[in-house]
Image (tube, rainbow, N blue to C red):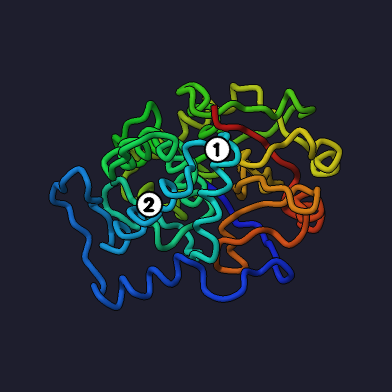
Amino acid sequence: MVWLFGTLKNENMKNKGLSFLSILLFFVMACQGNAKKSEEPSPQNELPLADSADQAIFSSFREIAKSSSFDSLATGDRVVEVAKLFLQTPYVASTLEGNEKEQLVVDLRELDCTTYLENVVVLSELFARENVQAGDFLNALERLRYRDGKLTDYSSRLHYFSDWIFENEQKGIVKNRTAEIGGIKYNKSINFMSSHVDSYPALKADINLVAKIRETENEINKRELFYLPEEQIQSVEDQIQNGDLIAITTLIKGLDISHVGIAIHVNNRLHLLNASSRQKKVVISDLPLAEMLMKSKYQSGIMVCRLQ
């Protein structure tokens, strides 16, 4: 995804003490040290991730989901419970970038807003099943993150989040509800990546990728997109359910979405579960979402989708 991170503040709603994930990571890292990336095939019940701590986190979350009967929850409630498991997890920007060749990156220890949302979506889907293995996680993540569910190269990743919504609606994973809850047309020319090639090492290294990205932008620009302007959000909060996926639109030229997160209602108001660049961790927004956006000069509204 292409984004510039929103500025969220969460002073009154901080969790006290260390999160479960923080405690888990302390003991895992103390025992195992800092593991290297592995490119060798792994058994079905092991994750070929950047750090062996990821496998411990996955296994622990799986046990929590099983013991807490996540599979019996309604989809939206399950999404929120999975999202809460990541509270206090450190925020790190651009976690999918930096590899010479595009690869399926999984990091449950450090998240940006997109990887947070993607991990929550995949785990929420998997924890509705029995006997979930790590290999299932990898397959589901690749299907979610890439065009047609297949990693081919850098351009196959769904960088623009409106494109992510479109593609995953085609796959039957999400339903875009923006128009049906009162959204208006989002008239904008999307070309941020092809206009800022120097900001993307993968594009600078391979001019052929720029042409592919431009093709994607052209396809996005043919679509009819909708958004809810920030001043209308409060009036439709009752139509946005816990666990809905929220994509925040932006005034930045050429860019569709600047931040993403998970809807959660607190004291009868709509808030956002998100990996916050300002607070450097996963939090529940202090302000209701509508007020949060009104305070930002770069954010203009939201798109809303729901897991199917």
Please provide percent x and percent y for residue 224. Answer: 65, 22
Q: Kindly indicate whether the residue at mark 2 contacts the one at mark 1 (C-beta within 8 angstroms).
A: no
Residue identifier under label 1: 73
Q: Residue at image x 43%, y 43%?
A: 123
Please provide percent x and percent y for residue 220. Answer: 55, 28
As helix, strand or loop, the secondary structure at mark 2 comes to helix
Total residue callouts? 2
Q: Quadrant of the C terminus?
A: top right
Other residues around mark 2 within 10 Å, as few (<14) / some (14–19) / many (≥20): few
Residue 181: mark: none
As helix, strand or loop, the secondary structure at mark 1 comes to loop
Q: Residue at image x 49%, y 64%?
A: 89
Judging depth in this view, the residue of 237 and 40 nearest the camera is 237
* Vertical order, 277 against 257 (above or below): below
Residue 63: mark: 2
Q: Residue at image x 61%, y 61%?
A: 283
* Vertical order, 256 against 33 (above or below): above
Three-letter code for the amino acid on which mark 1 is drawn: Leu
In the rendered view, does 208 fall on the left or right side of 192?
left
Judging depth in this view, the residue of 237 and 73 nearest the camera is 73
